[in-house]
Amino acid sequence: MKKSAYEVLGVPQDAPLAAIRASYMALALQWHPDKQHQQRPADTDKAAARFHDINAAWETLRDPQARAEHDRQLASSSRLGPLHDSVNIEDMDFDDALDSFFTPCRCGGRFLLSITQADAGVDAVDCSQCSLWIRITSEQAA
Ligand SMILES: [Zn+2]
């Protein structure tokens, strides 16, 4: 699940703007591309992505209207829908076009788990069309 702007900046949701600004300044300095001296290009990319997220989060929270909208979205997404099922990843189908495992939902939508998510250890995915979600297990025979 995508991090909220508050999580990105490490501040509580009711933080005053001054506190958010202070946290943003510290993080932006820490993750600024000019400050990165990573050995591996992949780490540099990660730092750049982090820096981008930090700036995007600040752009959202500094604007009262954007912040209110973000809060509204958080309120609706934090109510995780009912658990539909537990599915072993071995039992899911694979969609080559989407590079994702999938299993159908009873609403006609699909639960999609991309290879990237699977590699990252994501173990719960939402239906593409309704509020149901499934837990994904991966008990592999040793
Ligand atoms: Zn569904």
Image (spheres, rainbow, N blue to C red):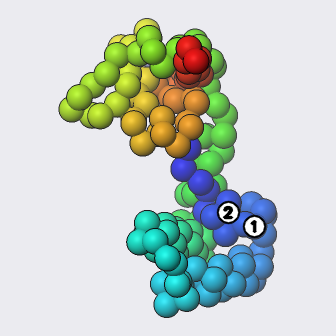
Name the one closer to the observer, 71 or 35.
35
In three-dimensional space, the C-alpha distance between marks 2 and 1, rounded to whole angstroms, equals 5 Å
- Say what secondary structure mark 2 lies in: helix
Name the one closer to the observer, 91 or 83.
91
Identify the residue at horizontal 63%, vertical 64% (top origin): 8
Rendered location of residue 79, percent (x, y): 66, 34
Amino acid type at circle 1 is Val
Rendered location of residue 140, percent (x, y): 55, 18
Vertical comparison of 129 with 85: above or below: below
Vertical comparison of 45 with 131: above or below: below
Which numbered marker is on residue 11?
1
Q: Is residue 17 shown left or right of residue 39?
A: right
Name the one closer to the observer, 58 or 66.
58
- Say what secondary structure mark 1 lies in: loop
Residue where numbered disc 2 is placed: 6
Mark 1 is surrounded, within 10 Å at the Cα level, by few (under 14), some (14 to 19) or many (20 or more) other residues, namely: some
Identify the residue at horizontal 61%, vertical 70% (top origin): 61
Ligand 1 has an atom within 8 Å of the beta carbon of the residue at disc 1: no
Closer to the N terminus: mark 2 or mark 1? 2
Amino acid type at circle 2 is Tyr
Rendered location of residue 32, percent (x, y): 53, 84
Q: Is residue 3 shown left or right of residue 103?
A: right
Identify the residue at horizontal 55%, vertical 36% (top origin): 122
